[in-house]
Image: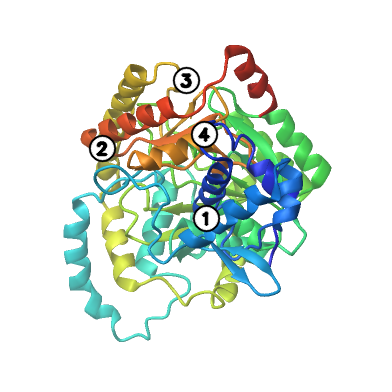
Amino acid sequence: MSSLSARALATMLDGWRSVASAPAYMALADRVRLLILDGRISLGMRVPAERDLAAQLGVSRTTVTAAYTELREAGYLDSVRGSGSVARLPVQRAPMIEPLGNELLDFSIASLPALPAVVGAAQRAAQLLPAYLGSAGFDRVGLPVLRQAIADRYSARGLPTTPDQIMVTLGAQHAIALLARTLLSRGDRALVESPSYPHAFEALRNAGARLVPVAVTSAEGWDTQGFEQSIARTSPSIGYLMPDFHNPTGASMTPEFRERALALAERHGTALIADETMADLAIDEMDPVLPFAAYGPEGNAAILVGSVGKTVWGGLRVGWVRARPRVIQQLVRARAEGDLGTPALEQLIVADLLGDYDSLLAIRRTQLRQGRDRMARLLADRLPEWSVPYVTGGVTTWVNIGVPVSSQLALAARGEGLQIAAGPRFGMDGAFERFLRIPLGHTEAEQIRGVDALANAWASVGRYSVAESDLLAEVV
């Protein structure tokens, strides 16, 4: 059982007393609960002893005891004899702050509803399924028809690819986790962006990696100097990157930096994994960008991860890896530990959809453009003090709220009927309290409701003077 030190938890709890009207024990319980809901305190992790946390926070032990009691009664902590208290979720996951009105509107998941074309593709795939029923159905590499379709799409985008360079997976997250446990040994370093996709952090840590962060911002993109220094100084075994419409910042790498990154990685023996799940989601018209691996020697220097979870529908659990054949063979051998293949029917559905993929992407482009522009107008009207970047692609915007109260704001938003992930969910060690990731794919009614909830929550959280906010912003 892993343990969370009092010092580490105190770092995560920074600013937990920002609502002066709330009793100290309740404010502490609320913040710990949010950390559990956000996944920053892993389920089953042992939290610090009451005395240790009280000393670290500079409060009485009574305050911590009352907070832990509140969390146990709500189902977020469980007492284990001889092991203290461990984090868990209540059976019904009922929040300690009840939402007002209807059920929670979920802004924590950045996705879009299924495209109507899925229905027709499923019907056509079902007609083809009988031809595959004679096999055992356990296929760790993927159906030839889908692997060929994926390879053809890479080739059409400017990266010649053959089916033996493709492995079909259960979505992009499955691909990332499989790559992590196949390519990493415990204690290896893994280069990651900060902020980044939190489940990638989890997959890399579960494989035993020590994470090496490199900064990415909406305005400036990648810290290229920091990237080069991190690879040169630490020689990470792998690097996990999102070069296209980065989640959550929306930034995209320049072609020049892609070339530099791949050359540097090859020099230091680092395998770069490029998560391209957002690559097809350009909102504005722009010059086409080649797949990341095309900027390396012979187009084989990087491992690419893709899926239809963002472009078509998250309910189609189909993704893929594009890599050298020997890497694909490694993944096939390692896969049986976790699963025995991707469902044949879903693969046939995706193979059908890839036949008219560009038309489907045009529909998504229109939806996202409308969502981006509408969200920008709503935020400018209700929350004009927030800084909203202009994004050219992807499904989110990374909003700077100006003061480090993102966790408290997310907690208050639940009371207004909105579930949203706080900025630190996308960082490491409590960073990004001044940021909030807001999705762009919801309907107009949902966006209005969500922004109203954020505005109401914003009015309820603690405020800082200009001088204080400037000071806090420098250390976050």
Q: Mark 2 to mark 4: distance in Å?
A: 21 Å
The nearer-to-camera label among 1 and 3 is: 1
Marks 4/1 in contact by CB < 8 Å: the verdict is no
Determine the residue positioned at 47% across, 29% down.
Answer: 461
Q: Which residue is mark 3?
A: 387
Q: Position of residue 163 (x, y in %)?
A: 46, 63
Determine the residue positioned at 20% across, 71% down.
Answer: 126
Q: Which mark sits nearer the N-terminus, 1 or 3?
A: 1
Marks 3/4 in contact by CB < 8 Å: the verdict is no
Q: Mark 4 to mark 1: distance in Å?
A: 23 Å
- At label 3, the amino acid type is Ser
The nearer-to-camera label among 1 and 2 is: 1
Q: Position of residue 423 (x, y in %)?
A: 53, 37
Determine the residue positioned at 43% across, 43% down.
Answer: 157
Q: Which residue is mark 2?
A: 446
Q: Which residue is mark 1?
A: 70
Helix, strand or loop at label 3? It is loop
Q: Mark 3 to mark 4: distance in Å?
A: 14 Å
- At label 4, the amino acid type is Ser
Q: Position of residue 21 (x, y in %)?
A: 50, 32
Determine the residue positioned at 46% across, 39% down.
Answer: 410
Q: Mark 1 to mark 3: distance in Å?
A: 36 Å
State the mark number for residue 406.
4
In this rendering, position of residue 228 left or right of residue 68: right
